[in-house]
Image: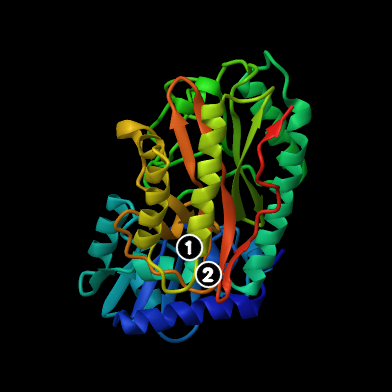
Amino acid sequence: MKIPESELTRRRNVLQEKLRQEEVDGVLLAQQMSMYYFTGTMQCQYVYVPAQGAALALVRRNIARAQAETSVRLVPLAGFNSLPSLLGEVGRLGLELDVLPAALYLRLVAVFPDRKIVDVSRPVREVRQVKSEYELDLLAEAARMVDEMNRRVPELLVEGKEEIVLASEVEAILRRLGHQGVARTRGFNQEMFYGHVLSGESGGVASFLDSPTGGNGLSAAQPQSAGWKKLAAGEPITIDYAGIYQGYKVDQTRLFSIGPLPELLNDAFSTAVAVQDKVCALLVPGRSGAEIYEAAAAVADKAGLSRHFMGYGDTQVRYVGHGVGLEYDEFPVLAKGSPHLLAENCVVAVEPKFVFPGLGVVGLENTWLVAGNGARKISLTPDAPVVV
């Protein structure tokens, strides 16, 4: 599906307004999802967006494919040293310094010795946090994908089945529905394969990922998500996967079990729902991510579950939600001390979870649209735990 020219123009115009406010003459994008967002193709080596005028997609190979995928002007890139002549007069050049490798940064500094290099990571990410009607339609399709997958999970739950087998079955369903397989994250060294499938005590195992859940994984080389643990009766089984359609994610977590769960875990799930209700009441334009996190943490504290909220002990993460779109960790972040202010048509995944070492994790996650008249749920699957 080709991104409409009008949509690409809208995105460029919003970025250019921010560049002019920052007094930046242009931004040279090198991160894949940023380049895709502003061009609709992943065939670029770099993308240059000036503060005024047309964007340039700089392509070294596959220019014929790029022509079929984008309406943005394509320019063949002969080599790295040709960049200054292609960009022309640029006094203040913006780069995404939060993700740009140091070696590439140093090369750019050397090839642009007379330009002032400035960081434009924040304005670029702010453009992406507000979704258009075009993007919301893609998210609706992603919601249908992950909903269909979750509705088929109960038939797959059998005592003695390994987590990794369950994960492979769930992933096969998603792939047949058109899931791209790659689950992109912007943060340095943050990576994920589809998401997390965890059962019982595995749900209480933290990992390097900036997430309330981790899991044992298959080895120390991939220490998260499903491992060889076998499903057992009376324990929580969480499926934390996103539907991904045309690159856009609807992040969602649902709780399952074979037979009833202990009262402690059922009560904790009820508290997770209460946290979600509190957060969603605050998902309105102008609210800060910090204010929303503090309100969520207060609900957990009142229930006597603050030590288990979003992790356990020193493994707790200090957020309750995050923006989603082309990546899992987009703006705004609903986190302790977050400066982000919600704007209309931001899309956030709200994921209140409680972790109990030795028992597992319970909670839920839904993706929501911040609308002028309150939050609108994009996720489709019912919230209630499913007992088989």
Q: Position of residue 122 (x, y in %)?
A: 35, 66
Q: Is residue 99 visible?
A: no
Q: Position of residue 25 (x, y in %)?
A: 33, 81
Q: Position of residue 366 (x, y in %)?
A: 59, 51
Given the image, on which type of amino acid does mark 2 rest? Phe
Q: Look at the picture and state if 173 lies above or below 138.
A: above
Image quarter in which the C terminus is found? top right
Given the image, on which type of amino acid does mark 1 rest? Ser
Q: Secondary structure at mark 2?
A: helix
Q: Is residue 153 visible?
A: yes
Q: Residues within 10 Å of mark 2 (few under 14, many from 20)?
A: many
- 265, 184: nearer the viewer: 265
Task: In the rendered structure, find residue 228 and report the number of the disc placed on it.
Answer: none
Image quarter in which the N terminus is found? bottom right
- Quick check: 241 left or right of 319? right
Q: Look at the picture and state if 177 lies above or below 340.
A: above
Question: Circles 1 and 2: CB distance less than 8 Å?
Answer: yes
Whole-Å distance between the Cαs marked 1 and 2?
6 Å
Task: In the rendered structure, find residue 38 and report the number of the disc placed on it.
Answer: 2
| Residue at position x 66%, y 54% in the image | 379
Question: Residue 263 sits in which quadrant?
Answer: top right
Task: In the rendered structure, find residue 34 and report the number of the disc placed on it.
Answer: 1
